[in-house]
Structure formats: C-alpha cells, structure tokens
Amino acid sequence: MANFGDFQVGIYLDGMMNGTTPDLTTNLARIEDQAREVLEPEAMGYIVPSAGDGATTRANREAFDRWRIIPRMLRGTAERDHSTTVLGTEMAAPVMIAPVGVQTLAHPQGELATARAATEMGLTYIHSTAASHDFEQVAEASGAGSRWYQLYYPTDPDVTESFLERAKASGYETLVVTLDTTLLGWRPADLDRGFLPFLSNVGVANYLSDPAFRSKLDRSPEEDPGSATFLWAGMFPNPGLSLADLPFLRERWDGPIVLKGIIHPDDARAAVDAGVEGIVVSNHGGRQVDGAMGSLDALPRVVEAVGDRATILFDSGIRTGTDVVKALALGAEAVLLGRPFLYGLALDGQAGVEHVLRCLLAELDLALTLGGYPSIADLGPEALERF
C-alpha cells in the first residue's frame, strides 16, 4: 500500500527527470503569500484576517510553537496506516475539511471543487450553512465521499428543521453545530472595505434554495433579492442560543451531534451532559473574539474534562503536517483544516485543494514515521515537550 509520504518521491522525480517543479508551494505555512497574488482584495480581506488586531490568530500559532515533537528511534515504522473512524465515519487520515463559508470568493466552483477534492483524498468534507452552493449540489459533487453538515442555528425553527431534513436526505452523516458565531465578530479588514458578501446574497445558497425559507417571502429571491437578504439578516444572528436549544436538534437529528467552538472545560462538560457525542475545540480561527486563548492551549483541558465521554476534535491554526501531529498527541481524534485548503482552491481549484491535502498528509506521514510513531494510536502527550 502506498504511503502519503510517497508524494514527495513523485515531486523529486518530476524535477530531476522532467525539469518540472510544483506550481504551488509545498510549504503550507507560506501558501497564503502565493494566494495573495490571485485573490481579489475583498476576498483576501474576508478569508485571511481575523477579529480585531489578530491577537487570537497569533495566539493559535504561538500555542503550536510552544510544543516540540520528541522523535524516537529504532521503533520499526516501515508499516504504517493513518486511517481512522470518527463517530462512525471512516476516513483515510484524521484530517477533515473544516466548514468554511462563501468559498466562491476563492474560486467560482467553491464548495463543489472542495467536496470533490475531499472525496478524491478519502477525507470528510463538512458543509457550511454559509455556503455558496447548497446541500444537494455539494452532495452530488461529493458523490460517494463522506460528508458532515455544519449548522449555524437559525432563529426560525421551521428553517432549522428544513435544513436538518435536507442535510439528512443528502447523506450528511454528522451534525456540527457552531456555537461561537451567534454574531459576527469585529473584523476591521471587512469593515474598512464595507464588505459583507451575505448582503449581496452570496454565501446564502442553503437559505435561498430552502422551501421553508422561501415560504416566508411574498416574492421569490429571484424576483426580490432584497427581501430575501432582509429575511436572512433576521435569522442568522442568534445570540440567545443556549443549552435549552439542543433538545430541538436531538429530536430532529438521529445521527451524532458535535458542538464546535468550545474552549472552556466547563462548557465541554455541560455539552456532554446534555447528550452530544463530540466537541470541536475551536476559537473559529481567531475570527470571532480578539485576545482569546489559543485553541491548542485549550485542548488538553477539554480532553481531561470530557475526553473519556466524547469525541474531541480540533480546529484553529492547523497549517502543517506537524501541527496535526501536535494536536493528535494532545488528545484530538482528528483535526479540521481551514484556510490552507482555501488558498489551494484560489490558486488552482480542485487540483489546488488536492495539492494542499497531499502536502499536509505527506508531511504528517513523514513526521510520524521519522518521529517513531507508525500509527496515530501511538501518539500521546509524551510525544511532545512544552517550551
């Protein structure tokens, strides 16, 4: 069986035999710089910057830098397998495509290209409520691939129920409820440009195609887009979201439910006590609260609090394969990859996303092998040292 790390062999052979080098950098920590050359300023302003002055985004990266991998030798790592099963979903590696909205800002194919890339790589795609393509379109693009659905909980129960029904009918296996975006954070890069794509009905495809949503309009979104925008704007902000809202979901969703956006162990305990199966430790990539703690700093405390009762996933700050190693060693069962795949999407559509995923998985495979950890099951906190 081929290993992910073999991807580098093909790159070397192309270079030495054909004189060709990759069009996209293999350094995923630097691919943002390459994407800047092709993205429009509004798109770059929406995708890259974070809340406030970016302190939380910096904290995410600083948290990774404080941990160092301790390579082990003479442990026989020729045979390795990084496949895993998360909440009943099989995947080729413990890496998932994070739910990222408005992907057409990066490329016209948006979520369709990303879903196809995830299927090609054997990874799980998580579909955002704030998508530019709807449930059914993305499910068709995903094909036989595994897919989950991320819910921004609308204030309208009819639309919420319709979203859940459509997601289930379209083969989305697990529900991921985002908790940390009941309002948009303070994002100066967007504010300075006066740019919010949703107000142009971009990134609201799930709403505009939804029968419950459309039934609340006097005229269709095609006939009266302004009224559709106004209706969406009344449903999206949901600062009143609380634990009391979870039973509504449980009654209407028979698969696993995961809550995304938790970094405090008490919140994790409350969520698991309420009956959810999983937690995504995340600060939304620094896009919501400036000055918040780094997600990786929060991960061990959440694992200690509920890791024996729930599946713990990690999001925010993953850039490289070694980042994945650190998150897994600290207790995550899988990670969610966000911005890097968007940069690949902007640079070369589906092929660009696949390039990013191949690079990430190759580095993950090589770091584990060279570190003396032939399986992700061999990883634990003892694989790291904090500095």
Image (cartoon, rainbow, N blue to C red):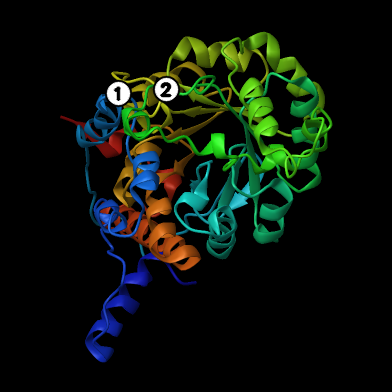
The front one of 11 and 31 is 31
The residue wearing badge 2 is 185
Per the image, label 1 sits on a secondary structure element best described as loop
Percent x, y of residue 115: 58, 56
| Amino acid at pointer 1 | Gly
Q: How many marks?
A: 2
The front one of 245 and 17 is 245
Percent x, y of residue 107: 48, 58
Q: Residues within 10 Å of mark 1 (few under 14, many from 20)?
A: some
The residue wearing badge 1 is 52
Q: Residues within 10 Å of mark 2 (few under 14, many from 20)?
A: some
**Residue 232 is drawn in which quadrant?**
top right
Q: Residue furthest bottom?
A: 17
| Amino acid at pointer 2 | Gly
The front one of 347 and 149 is 347
- Whether the residues at callouts 1 and 2 have beta carbons within 8 Å, the answer is yes
Question: What residue lies at 37% left-to-right and 71% top-to-bottom?
Answer: 6
The front one of 121 and 326 is 121
**Residue 281 is drawn in which quadrant?**
top left
